[in-house]
Amino acid sequence: MDIIALNIFADVPPVTKCWTMACLAVLILTSLNLIDAAKLIYNYDLVFKKGQYRRIFLSVFNYGTFSWATIGNILVSANHLSFLESSYNERRKFLWLITVLLSLIVYITKYVQPMSSLGMILHENLVNFHFKKHANEMNGGAVGGFIIATPLLPYLMYFNMYFSQGVSLLEISINFIPSHIIYYLDDIVAKLYDVDLMKTPYDMWLSFQAWRLKDNVSDPQEIEELNPISAAEVTDD
């Protein structure tokens, strides 16, 4: 059984694996009272006005108190993130997506106190982003005997939160507004204007290097010798 568990964990992509281990570590350390549970609560004023920046880190990996339900929630989330990470050919793009989404989420918390941890909200936005980006590839799910398109399933939960639980629209919107903004920048603007606004800083640097080489060197073979990674971009032009 232990060998099976290790084999399953070995197949998890690196980013998701590190995230899962960090979540479990925070869970265990909190249960042993080595981390104050009060420090897991994220608040914009406490972080940026009182300098308690570690609350961001702890909140990203906070999935609740130690219980089998929490462990199950972490494993289900890890399964989702593993699938999302595997859909990216370059890991740095997945990391950049996480960074930009988390930055937007933290900015929104300036105006509303989140109901759940930053990690849960980030996971929700990653799933929503994937749903929107791959909506045509997904099958619908059955809810109450009706077939519902998969990308619409999260919104059924949001409607329930608003009408049944009395959660404000601003509190709910933090779960999907950041992912919608990123989707618009990544997909729609890129198609309309042929501009990749979600390019990672490293890719921006490669493009800059290619542009600089293009101005200084006219022979693609010479460009390839100087910068083989950027040569393809120059020859495409």
Image (cartoon, helix red, strand yellow):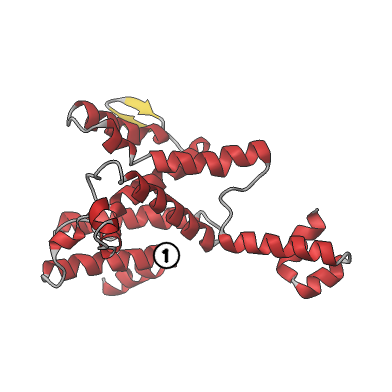
Residue with the most extreme front position: 49
* Residue at the image position 49 percent from the left and 44 percent from the top: 182
- The residue lying toward the viewer, choosing from 231 and 137, is 231
Residue 41 visible in the picture: yes
Q: Residues within 10 Å of mark 1 (few under 14, many from 20)?
A: some
Describe residue 111's horizontal placement relative to residue 93 as left or right: left
Q: Quadrant of residue 128?
A: top left
SS for dot 1: helix
Question: What residue does disc 1 label?
Answer: 15
- The residue lying toward the viewer, choosing from 110 and 130, is 110
Describe residue 186's horizontal placement relative to residue 213 as left or right: left
Q: Quadrant of residue 203?
A: bottom right
Residue 43 visible in the picture: no
Residue with the most extreme right position: 219
Amino acid under disc 1: Val
Describe residue 105's horizontal placement relative to residue 115 as left or right: right
* Residue at the image position 15 percent from the left and 67 percent from the top: 30
Residue 147 x, y percent position in the rendering: 37, 27
Describe residue 38's horizontal placement relative to residue 189 as left or right: left
Residue 175 x, y percent position in the rendering: 33, 41
Residue 171 x, y percent position in the rendering: 27, 38
* Residue at the image position 79 percent from the left and 66 percent from the top: 213
